[in-house]
Image: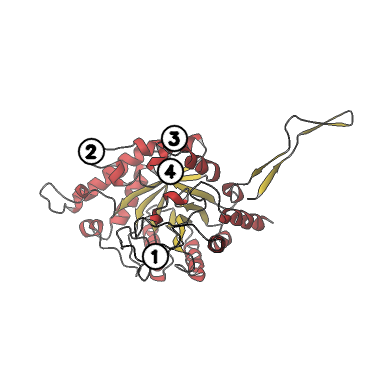
Amino acid sequence: MKLKTVNFIGFVILGTVILSCSPKTEEPETIKDAYAEFFDIGTVLNAWQILGNDSAAVNVAIKNFNTVTAENAMKWEKIHPEPGVFNFEVADKIVEIAEQNNMKVIGHVLLWHSQTPKWVFFGEDGELTSRDTLLARLKNHIEVVLGHYKGKIHGWDVVNEAFNDDGTQRNTLWKKIIGDDYIQKAFEFAAEADPNTELYYNDFNMYKPQKVDSVIKMVNDLREKGVKIDGIGMQGHYGLKDNPLLNEFEASVKAYSELGVKVMITEMDITLLPFPSPGNGADVGMRFELEEGLDPYKEGLPDSVKVELAGRYSDLFRVLLKYSNSVSRVTIWGVNDLYSWRNNWPIRGRSDYPLLFDRQNQPKLVVDSLITLANQYKN
């Protein structure tokens, strides 16, 4: 890793230099320090880590990142599992960790078609509830959650994954029951509940042209109606060689930057494993069986692939540095490879290596590469 030098403190007395008792030391430069003048570098913590069961991973997060997101603790099924029942224990702990260590907290997520309890969408008779009832439940959820964390959350993913790759709206229960304006309503409720927190739209495959066009249209439509939206979250679940191609990635970052909103890579990881079907993405409902050749690195990662991973991250970060006037944050989706969701999606039990730190919490080659890249842009 790159090293930064801590110099002696010197005093001059009658022409003699007296050195203080503090020795000259060197300590590794962290990635959050290297990118401080460009954009925030974040990570995600899971409940096991947040509740103190892996202090080593939490220490890596505190030392190397300056924003933190709860992987699941703020999703509806965890924080609001039953009508009138709110469970803030784990989410409160992540806020406490952040406050003690000068880290920004990103709230994830207020409205999503996945990991939302069934009671939200159905009545006691088992039938789909009405538009008015679902809107009331959504508003109550947002008011209570944002009210609980008012002044403590830097920004919220308000709506997650509302569009298909072809640019059409997903036909979720939110859309089916409320209608096309459910996205607008969610942002309105969030802005009313906490006017001072930043509000984001978040989605995967945000580099695909038809989705780019639809998201841009959505942002412009909201702003024309006076609805607050502060940023676009590009999830960043990418592949080693494509998904996206570099020119696709840059085109999308440029397009979102020209909107005048903040641009974020919110869930970045780079899978090194073969995908079992054409395409990629991050649809959590997708599942496949393990077949021969689909878990090539279960005994460890070859040095040549470590170099490829560092190069891929560097290529993507080079684009983000180019647009750093608009890019406000890059969040790596996990502290280390051990906890990455990529190990179990879309095939359970594989060994992936998509993050910046290995399973022993040691920085990988990619960390030094990214620090070197940032320092080159400072010169």
Q: Is residue 97 above or below residue 207?
A: above
Q: Does label 2 or label 1 sit earlier along the sequence? A: 2
Q: Dot 1 corresponds to which residue? A: 294
Element carrying mark 4: loop
Of the numbered discs in the image, which one, if any, rests on residue 96?
3
Q: Looking at numbered disc 3 in the image, what kind of residue is underneath it? A: Glu
For the residues bearing labels 4 and 2, Cβ distance under 8 angstroms: no
Depth-wise, is mark 4 or mark 3 nearer the camera? 3
Q: Does label 4 or label 2 sit earlier along the sequence? A: 2
Q: Does label 4 or label 1 sit earlier along the sequence? A: 4
Of the numbered discs in the image, which one, if any, rests on residue 84?
2
Element carrying mark 3: helix
> Real-space Cα distance between discs 3 and 1?
40 Å
Q: Looking at numbered disc 2 in the image, what kind of residue is underneath it? A: Gly
In percent of width and height, residue 30 lies at: 59, 47
Q: Locate residue 89: give its quadrant.
A: top left
Q: Is 360 on the left-hand or right-hand side of 52?
A: right
Element carrying mark 2: loop
Q: Does label 3 or label 1 sit earlier along the sequence? A: 3
Element carrying mark 1: loop
Q: Is 378 on the left-hand or right-hand side of 248?
A: right
> Real-space Cα distance between discs 4 and 2?
26 Å
- Rendered image coloring scheme: secondary structure
> Real-space Cα distance between discs 4 and 3?
20 Å
Q: Nearer the viewer, residue 287 or 40?
A: 287
The residue most toward the right is: 15
